[in-house]
């Protein structure tokens, strides 16, 4: 089933979670999809309805899901509960420096890292 869905979606991220599910960000339709290991769709979250577009990275830590949004000079990290309720959004200036001289996140941010114990 996952391969059939992959043909109809613009997939950006796939995350295998410790809770025995897969999370997939669908860029084209601004959705987050949760599948079980058998490939059955369990939950479909309409991210666009929450104002979240173009998720380029997903991370799960403890009881939270973190999404990195990169959408035409609109960068943000969104924090959700494990049942996909949005609890916080943190905007990132698109000219935020990334450490190397002259480079900003608009020059190529592609993911987020979370301190994982």
Image (spheres, rainbow, N blue to C red):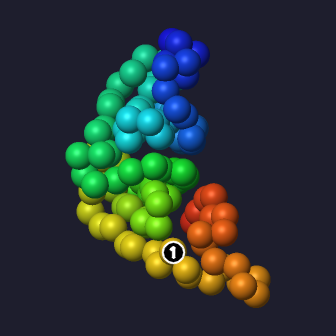
Q: Residues within 10 Å of mark 1 (few under 14, many from 20)?
A: some
Q: In what element is the residue under mark 1?
A: loop
Taking the spot 47% from the left edge, 67% from the top edge, the residue there is 73
Q: Is residue 49 left or right of residue 93?
A: left
Residue 4 in view: yes
Residue 2 in view: no
In-front residue for pair 60/45: 45
Residue 115, position in %: x, y?
60, 69
Taking the spot 49% from the left edge, 20% from the top edge, the residue there is 8
**Number of marks present in the image shown:** 1
In-front residue for pair 109/37: 109
* Image quadrant containing the C terminus: bottom right
In-front residue for pair 88/10: 10
Taking the spot 38% from the left edge, 35% from the top edge, the residue there is 29
Answer with the quarter of the image where residue 34 lies. Answer: top left
Residue 5, position in %: x, y?
49, 18
Residue 52, position in %: x, y?
34, 53
Considering every residue shown, the one lying at the far bottom of the view is 101
- Residue wearing tag 1: 94
Considering every residue shown, the one lying at the far right of the view is 100
Name above or below for residue 30 compared with residue 9.
below
Taking the spot 54% from the left edge, 34% from the top edge, the residue there is 11
Residue 46, position in %: x, y?
29, 39
């Amino acid at each position: 089933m996952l391969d059939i869905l992959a043909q109809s979606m613009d997939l950006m991220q796939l995350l295998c979670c410790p809770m025995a599910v897969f999370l997939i960000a669908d860029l084209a339709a601004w959705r987050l999809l949760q599948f079980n290991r058998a490939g059955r769709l369990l939950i479909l979250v309409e991210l666009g309805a929450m104002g979240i577009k173009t998720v380029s990275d997903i991370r799960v830590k403890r009881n939270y899901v973190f999404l990195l949004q990169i959408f035409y000079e609109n960068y943000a990290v969104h924090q959700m509960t494990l049942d996909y309720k949005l609890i916080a959004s943190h905007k990132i200036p698109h000219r935020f420096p990334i450490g190397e001289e002259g480079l900003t996140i608009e020059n190529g941010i592609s993911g987020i890292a979370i301190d994982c114990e």
